[in-house]
Image: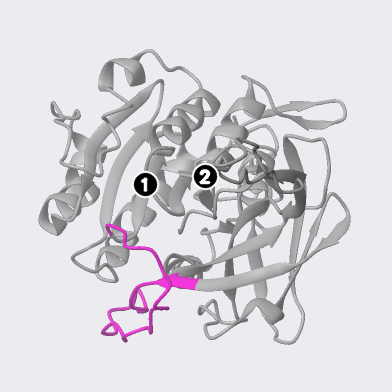
Amino acid sequence: MRRDARNAHAPRAPAAASGRALVLASTVAPLSAGAGIAAQQPTRYVERVDVARIIVDARVLDDRGSPVTGLTADDFKVSIDGKPARVETATWVGGPTADVDGAPPESTPRDAGAPADPGRLIVFVFQKDFEGSRLVGLMRMLLKSRGVLDTLTPDDRVAILSFDFHLKIWSDFTNDRERLDRILAHDLLLEQPPAVLASPWPSLIDRLDPDSGRRTYGIERALELIGQALQPLPGSKSLVLIGYGFGRLGPSGVVMENNYGAARQALVDSRTSVFSLDVTDADYHSLEAGLQLVSGQTGGFYSKTNVFPDRALRQLAGALAGYYVLFVERPEARRTVHDIKTELTRRKGNVLATTSVSEREPN
């Protein structure tokens, strides 16, 4: 029996404003040369109804962790603040699908309405800790995560960061697989991060410089900074958090601290889903609650890696393969943040979608 480590430490939506607007349309006849009298037509009022829309990014996986493609708007059911909301369109945005075991990528059809983008944007964040129950799992996942690189296309970009006592940046977004592989295989455990220059667009460290990382002492604050840096970049982003968790165990359970709410909001606003892979060698530990919470609230998933790491990586490859952009009518409500629930109606699958959406203008 394993020990219990309880004390372990897309496309832009059409611009629209909600509500009804009365548009005044009047015409004035030209002056009569003979009489000098202006003839004015009666004022006409035309009622126009503008409906605000909300973007919801949804990933759908089957029981094997493979992406479910070919879905339409009718396959989704979305409720906003507990009320049904009409799904206008569902657009698949995805790249090739592949197993992390090395199977060659298969071409995945791309919807003609999908936005032009630089490919998938993936941020790896490794929580470093040399405590025994964490170090072995971290080393295992550093090596196995190299297989994810084989599923990427030349258009995809990966950034690598780590967090121990503060946030460290190892690489800005890049498709240089040799460099990424070297970081995962050797540098991240045995070296100090080099001076990192900003990549050409898209860039993460344009808005997250190394000096800011060195002044960041909590993983929650690190996630907030990453979310803020990702906000200007288009489409849905993926953050792969490989670590042991966060939060504080109190009398009533695990308590989120260090302004976790700001981190969650920054990730939601930037359309960033967090996929948490737990490296702790334990069947249960208290800090896993933080990983579960941030993944569930941002449209990602949580998975343990101490028993079946390859299963977790197959699920990760499926989730990274693509997502649906849902344009959803927003019911009239005076709220800036809305609770969201996304389900399937006619197909089977596990839907990964954010549990809240902000009224902020999408990127």
Task: Choose top left, top right, bottom left or bottom right for residue 313.
Answer: bottom left
**Residue 114 included in the magenta stretch of the image:** yes
Residue 4 visible from this viewpoint: no
Indicate the amino acid at tag 1.
Answer: Val
Up-down relation of residue 237 to residue 360 (above or below): below
Report which residue position mark 2 lands on. 362
Indicate the amino acid at tag 2.
Answer: Pro
Q: Position of residue 44 (x, y in %)?
A: 76, 50
Which secondary structure class fits the magenta region best? Answer: loop
State left or right for residue 287 relative to residue 66: right
Residue 79 or residue 351, whichever sits in front? 79
Q: Residues within 10 Å of mark 2 (few under 14, many from 20)?
A: some
Q: Residues within 10 Å of mark 1 (few under 14, many from 20)?
A: many
Residue sitting farthest toward the front: 34
Residue at 57% across, 40% down = 31
Quadrant including the C terminus:
top left
Q: Position of residue 87 (x, y in %)?
A: 70, 68
**Residue 310 included in the magenta stretch of the image:** no
Residue 142 or residue 135, whichever sits in front? 142
Up-down relation of residue 67 to residue 6 (above or below): below
Label 1: state its secondary structure.
strand
Label 2: state its secondary structure.
loop
Up-down relation of residue 1 to residue 167 (above or below): below
Look at discs 2 and 1 and give the one toward the viewer.
2
The span shown in magenta is 92-118
Report which residue position mark 1 lands on. 123
Quadrant including the N terminus:
bottom right
Q: Earlier in the sequence, mark 2 or mark 1?
A: 1
Residue at 67% across, 22% down = 257
Q: Position of residue 247 (x, y in %)?
A: 66, 30
